[in-house]
Image (cartoon, grey):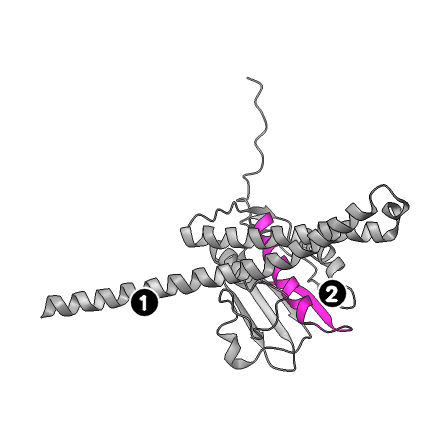
């Protein structure tokens, strides 16, 4: 009876695991089908318009330039979604590689702000820093990806005239980065789900794949840091994450001069 009961429990666990895997697969297929269809339709319509204008004066008009811009933008959206799905697959397989090295924190943050300005449009983008920040130990490209995901999320929910602020401070052996927005905030019951894959507070909102915050968490975790959110409805949201400070070389161990031999 004990063996039978144990077998029944194991079968139930396997069944539940299979159901979760099926739901995850269906979620991925739904995201891909929905989010790739829109840019693909834009590419098709723009390409057809360019074909109609080929060989006549319309090919040199602003309309043609807009059509080409739509194609480029749509391809970038598709590439972003594909990259996100590949990152999720690498995380699941334990194959997400990071190559940490000392990075100049202030320089990197200024680059983050400039890269986000085209998205900001009517939102004020602010960088607030202390006088001195030590280098951070991080994979540069992956850290930029974390900021891109967090800033993209903040800008998406901040209304025109609002503000998104990036700041940083030293906390012990880590640097704590913050991305604060003046958007609507997050309901308390939603906070526990905010870093889950494909989760969105408003299921009708299809401005993203629902993977950005989950990937940001996976990247921060891979660096040995942690990420969390502080928010209150009507008072905006602040996403915070930590990264280790790059250790300074021991005193008296500077570069070694070459010998004459």
Residue tagged by mark 2? 126
Residue 146 against residue 257 in the figure, above or below? below
Q: Which residue is mark 1?
A: 16
- As measured in the structure, the alpha-carbon distance from the residue carrying label 2 to the one carrying label 1 is 47 Å
Q: Is residue 3 left or right of residue 50?
A: left
Mark 1 Cα shell of 10 Å, populated few (<14), some (14-19), many (≥20) = few
Asked which quadrant contains residue 146, the reply is bottom right
What span is colored magenta in the figure? 141-170
Q: Nearer the viewer, residue 163 or 137?
A: 163
Residue at far front of view: 52
- Asked which quadrant contains residue 55, the reply is top right
- Disc 2 vs disc 1: which is toward the camera? 1
Q: Residue at x 54, y 44 (%)?
A: 249
| Count of labels in the image | 2
Disc 2 to disc 1: CB gap under 8 Å: no
Q: Quadrant of the C terminus?
A: top right
Among numbered discs 2 and 1, the one appearing first in the sequence: 1
Label 1 secondary element: helix
Q: Looking at the picture, how far across and down is residue 82, in whole percent?
A: 56, 52
């Amino acid at each position: 009876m004990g063996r039978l009961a144990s077998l029944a429990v194991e079968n139930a666990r396997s069944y539940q695991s299979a159901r979760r895997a099926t739901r995850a697969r269906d979620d991925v297929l739904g995201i891909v089908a929905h989010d790739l269809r829109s840019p693909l339709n834009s590419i098709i319509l723009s390409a057809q318009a360019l074909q109609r204008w080929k060989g006549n004066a319309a090919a040199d008009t602003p309309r043609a330039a807009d059509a080409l811009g739509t194609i480029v933008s749509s391809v970038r959206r598709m590439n972003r979604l594909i990259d996100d799905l590949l990152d999720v697959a690498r995380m699941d397989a334990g194959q997400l590689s990071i190559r940490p090295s000392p990075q100049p924190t202030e320089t990197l943050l200024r680059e983050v702000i400039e890269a986000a300005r085209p998205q900001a449009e009517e939102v004020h983008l602010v960088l607030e820093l202390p006088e001195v920040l030590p280098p951070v130990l991080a994979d540069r490209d992956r850290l930029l990806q974390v900021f891109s995901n967090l800033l993209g999320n903040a800008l998406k929910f901040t209304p025109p005239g609002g503000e998104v602020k990036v700041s940083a401070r030293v906390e012990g052996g880590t640097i704590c980065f913050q991305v604060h927005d003046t958007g609507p905030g997050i309901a308390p019951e939603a906070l526990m789900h905010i870093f889950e894959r494909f989760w969105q507070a408003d299921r009708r909102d299809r401005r993203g794949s629902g993977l950005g915050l989950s990937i940001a968490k996976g990247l921060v975790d891979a660096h040995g840091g942690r990420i969390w959110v502080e928010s209150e409805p009507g008072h905006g949201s602040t996403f915070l994450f930590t990264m280790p400070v790059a250790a300074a070389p021991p005193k008296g161990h500077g570069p070694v001069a070459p010998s004459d031999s």
